[in-house]
Image: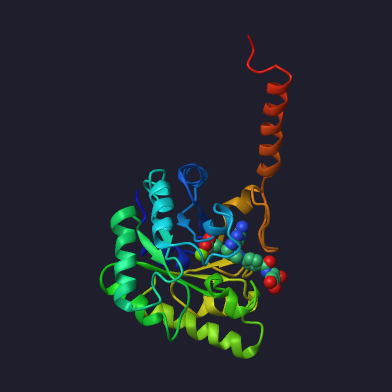
Amino acid sequence: MVVNVHQFKQWKRDGRAIVVLTAWDYMSGQIVVQAGADIVLVGDSLAMVALGYETTLPLTLEEMLHHAKAVRRAVDRVPLVVDMPFLSYQVSVAGAIHSAGRVLQETEATAVKVEGGHPAIAPTIAALVQVGIPVMGHVGLTPQSVNQFGGFRRQGTSAESAQRILEEAKAVEAAGAFCIVLEHIPAELAQQISQTLTIPTIGIGAGAHCDGQVLVTADVLGLSSWQPKFAKAYGNLRQSAIDAAHQFCEEVRTRRFPNP
Ligand SMILES: Nc1nc(=O)c2c([nH]1)NC[C@@H]1CN(c3ccc(C(=O)N[C@@H](CCC(=O)O)C(=O)O)cc3)CN21
Ligand SMILES: CC(C)C(=O)C(=O)O
Ligand SMILES: [Mg+2]
């Protein structure tokens, strides 16, 4: 049965962990679907993982649409969430509806994800939900604010900023988001937010008390050239791939491939 986004609230009440994995093309989409992810996220981390940028900021809406369409061809029965790129939703509420509407229309995504909370983004989330676009929120380390933060730094480490992030999370829920990503914040803060909200929290570098977890799939596979400290590699695909490609190079140079 196809899961709809509202059922995840019941999963939270049941204590059933929600697993989110990212994808950036057809092949990575197939891999995470076959692995059994509950939600596939076309994260704007693809700017760094698949396109080689140093931050997520250069990714455009057009580029995201291109990647999300490829992922969609691999994702059939699992909810597909697409990150709204920097500048595609912050300028105005009407602009956000237009951008997010294009994502649903052109990629057949189930929902979009936007970074931030109160006061700037919550009204935008409410407007998207009102026109029928489900929204996943994202607070804490919101990578599109990397220049404001002065690096990909852990957020919510002072009492004041922890309070602000809690308020943002509440505003995101009140605006109608169906779930919320908590990124790179102290575990105790993530626990407090998870206990306060009725929508599920999806942690990344936010401790063990979130209702679900997300990681960038390239990190999980051990495929990334670089990954955050909080990520865990369950494989070593990068070295396996280099070894395989290197073996091909050697066999061609020594005339062992192709065989007669
Ligand atoms: N491969 C990959 N995995 C990710 O999880 C990920 C991306 N890319 N790109 C988008 C964002 C960026 N993320 C990041 C990136 C770096 C740190 C990190 O290493 N933070 C250091 C401090 C860095 C600094 O001060 O500049 C830390 O100790 O908190 C954390 C999250 C998470 N996201
Ligand atoms: C890591 C997740 C939450 C994300 O926003 C991304 O991949 O861009
Ligand atoms: Mg993102």
Q: Is residue 13 visible?
A: yes
Q: Nearer the viewer, residue 137 or 120?
A: 120
What residue is rendered at 51% in x and 55% in y? 22
Question: Residue 29: x, y in percent?
Answer: 47, 46
- Image quadrant assignment for residue 132: bottom left
Q: Decide if residue 210 is on the left or right side of residue 238.
A: left
What residue is rendered at 44% in x and 69% in y? 179
Question: Residue 229: x, y in percent?
Answer: 70, 63
What residue is rendered at 57% in x and 52% in y? 217
Q: Decide if residue 106 is on the left or right side of residue 203.
A: left
Question: Residue 237: x, y in percent?
Answer: 66, 42
- Image quadrant assignment for residue 133: bottom left
Residue lying at the far left of the rendered structure: 131
Q: Note whether 73 is above or below 16 in the view shown.
A: above
Quarter the C terminus occupies: top right
Q: Is residue 212 visible?
A: no
Q: Note whether 15 is above or below 258 in the view shown.
A: below
What residue is rendered at 41% in x and 46% in y? 70
Question: Residue 12: x, y in percent?
Answer: 47, 66
Q: Nearer the viewer, residue 197 or 16?
A: 197
Q: How many marks?
A: 0
Q: Nearer the viewer, residue 47 or 82?
A: 47
Q: Note whether 175 is above or below 163 in the view shown.
A: above
